[in-house]
Image: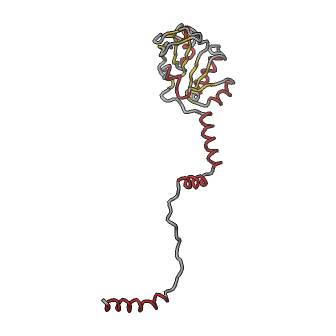
Amino acid sequence: MKQAISILTITLASLLPQISLAKDFGQHGLAFEVKEEGFIAMIQRKLKLIDIKSEEKKMLEIAKKAVEEPAPIANIKKTVKPATFTYDPSYILPDDIILPNGKLLYAKGTKVNPLDHMTLDKKLIFIDGRDLKQIEWFKDKKTAGNFNDQDKLILVAGRPIDLGNHLGQEIYFDQGGFLTTKFNIEQVPAIIEQEGKVLRIKELEVEAQSNQLATE
C-alpha cells in the first residue's frame, strides 16, 4: 500500500512542473450562457422586430379593400334561364309574444306572416356590379320608370362605392350572401317585390330585358 502511495506521489510530482508552466491561451470563439428564454421576454423580443406602422398600413389596406370591393357571393351567376318564383315569409313563433300590458298577442307555435302587418313598398334589385351589361340594364330601366329612387340596388359582386358614385345613388352589398341565400336567388339580375302575401322573385336575362319588364 505504501509502495502504491509512493508511486502516486512521484507521478503527481513529475506533473507539477508541467501544470505550473501551462499557458493560458485565452478564450476562442463565442461563449453563450445556457438559459431558457421566458415567454414574456420572447413576446417582447418578437414585438420589437415588428414594424408596427408597416403592419397597421397593411391592415388598413385590407380593411379598405374589403369595403371598396367585398368578396363576390359564391354560386351566383348571370341569368341564362329566366325564372319566376315566390317566397312565403311566414314563420312559426318559437315563443309566446306578450304585450307590455301582459296580454298575449300570439301564442307559441302560431304561424305569422309579416306581410299581414307591413308592406314592402320598394323593389330589391340584385346585379353583378362587374358586369357592364347589367349596370346598363339597371340604368335603362330606371330611366324608363321601371325603378325609382326608393328601390334598393344590391350587388352580389363589384365595387359598391364606385358604382354608387357613378349612378349617383346609394348602393348596397349582399354581405355573406345573406339575402340571396334566404330568397334562393341563384341568377342575376333578379328583382324581389311584394305580390299579395308573398314575395315574387324574378331572375331576368339582360338580353331579353325589353320584354321581361314591359308589364312592370
Q: Quadrant of the N terminus?
A: bottom left
Q: Position of residue 78 (x, y in %)?
A: 51, 25
User: Is 147 situated above or below 10?
Assistant: above
Q: Nearer the viewer, residue 3 or 43?
A: 3
- Which residue is rendered at x = 61% and y = 22% of the image? 153
Q: Quadrant of the C terminus?
A: top right
Q: Quadrant of residue 66?
A: top right
Considering every residue shown, the one lying at the far front of the view is 2
- Which residue is rendered at x = 65% and y = 16% of the image? 150
- Which residue is rendered at x = 50% and y = 21% of the image? 182
Q: How many marks?
A: 0
User: Is 2 situated above or below 86?
Assistant: below
Q: Position of residue 185 (x, y in %)?
A: 50, 21
Q: Quadrant of residue 116?
A: top right
Q: Quadrant of residue 151?
A: top right
- Which residue is rendered at x = 57% and y = 24% of the image? 127
Q: Position of residue 166 (x, y in %)?
A: 67, 27
Residue 84 visible somewhere in the drawing: no
The type of colouring in the image is: secondary structure
Considering every residue shown, the one lying at the far left of the view is 1
Residue 171 visible somewhere in the drawing: yes
Q: Nearer the viewer, residue 13 or 206?
A: 13
Q: Position of residue 35 (x, y in %)?
A: 50, 62
